[in-house]
Image: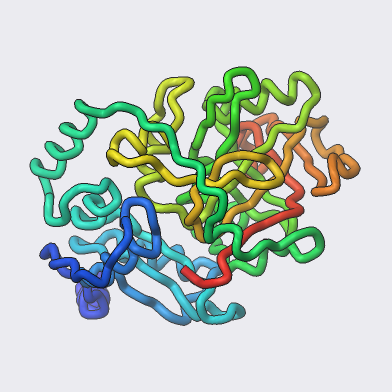
Amino acid sequence: MAKDSQRAIREAVDATDEAAEITPQHAGDPALDLRCFLERAQNAGELQVIEGADWNLEIGALTEIFAELETTPALLFDKIPGYAGGYRVLSNILKSPLRESLALGLRPGLRGVELARGVKERLNSLNPMAPVDIKEGPILENVLDGDDVNLFKFPTPKWHELDGGRYIGTFNAVVCKDPDSGYVNVGTYRVQIHDEKTVGVNMIAGKHGDLIGRKYWEKGEECPFLIVCGMPPSLMMATGLGLPWATSEYDFLGGFLGRPVPITKAGITGLPMRHHPRSCLKALHRRLRRNRVLKDLSVNGRVIMRRARNKRRSSKCGGSITVMTRLSRGRRRSKPI
């Protein structure tokens, strides 16, 4: 990148390398509440708001450019062309010691060896802690159902030029439950929008979500999945660890933070979801012959599932199992991020 371009970008960044004092008005838990996390990052000068960037490649390009800076702020894209203000996209979430500390529930200001030591001490003393079930949560405030479901209401980016389409699930959590043991798995899989009510979930063969799904499909049953978007960064860290089978990411995260993760049961699937995510997609999935479309599996929708024969078939599938889900119920907050 040219020096002039680097200088222009640096001048636009308000981020600071110093840990800031968190004022008393920032109540809440930044490790478990994305809104609180963003408030702390903004208070520390580590949140950059960018208005007017287009969902088609521009958000992705700016994300990559800022990620190369020595000091990288979290980016919050607003007033995206074609969408009302408040429908926002967040990127570069964990790109500084301060934001990593906030997400891990550690003391802000830790960095380098001190930050690594803080994580190691938590891991050495970790005892998994089951989540706590809260009957009502903000995620239940606004429900879109049936014909009202339109995934293009959200300004989902096409991140890279060669992507197969627009990916709503990158920094996300896909929740499913083992039908035999009741073990709840929370993993991160890429989720692509195909039309107003269809998403593709790229499930890598052998991952726990894939193994659980197969148990349902081999018996000819639908497998419930829950796709959580706008989740707290701590959950993303847990989903990326590759925990042993039967160890739920919810339990691990509760043990690491020293407090249970609050969850709310999703009505259509019964799966536990964080009660504070910004949006949540729920559906049933069934394994079918490739390109065959089912009639309604239930009153809630239709699904397709197919296996890519090789990586050349489509970048939508990537050579692994792709669940094509006909969504009938989505959830979003009545308030923006």
Q: What residue sits 59% from the left and 54% below the top?
A: 280
Looking at the picture, the colour scheme in use is: rainbow
Q: How many marks?
A: 0
Q: Nearer the viewer, residue 113 or 264?
A: 264
Residue 65 visible in the displayed image: no
Residue 332 visible in the displayed image: yes
Task: Establish if 287 lies above or below 53.
Answer: above
Is 199 placed left or right of 257 in the picture?
right
Q: What residue sits 38% from the left and 38% below the top?
A: 238
Q: Nearer the viewer, residue 243 or 190?
A: 243
Q: What residue sits 23% from the left and 30% below the top?
A: 123
Is 42 placed left or right of 197 in the picture?
left
* Residue situated furthest front in the rendering: 135
Q: Position of residue 300 (x, y in %)?
A: 80, 48
Task: Establish if 168 lies above or below 43.
Answer: above
Q: Position of residue 333 (x, y in %)?
A: 56, 65
Q: Nearer the viewer, residue 270 or 75?
A: 270
Q: Position of residue 190 (x, y in %)?
A: 54, 45
Is 218 placed left or right of 27 in the picture?
right
Using the rendered view, name the quadrant where residue 296 is placed: top right
Q: Quadrant of the N terminus?
A: bottom left
Q: Position of residue 158 (x, y in %)?
A: 55, 61
Using the rendered view, name the quadrant where residue 308 is placed: top right
Q: Nearer the viewer, residue 317 or 234?
A: 234
* Residue situated furthest right in the rendering: 295
Task: Establish if 151 lies above or below 100.
Answer: below
Is 337 placed left or right of 114 in the picture?
right
Q: What residue sits 44% from the left and 46% below the top?
A: 262
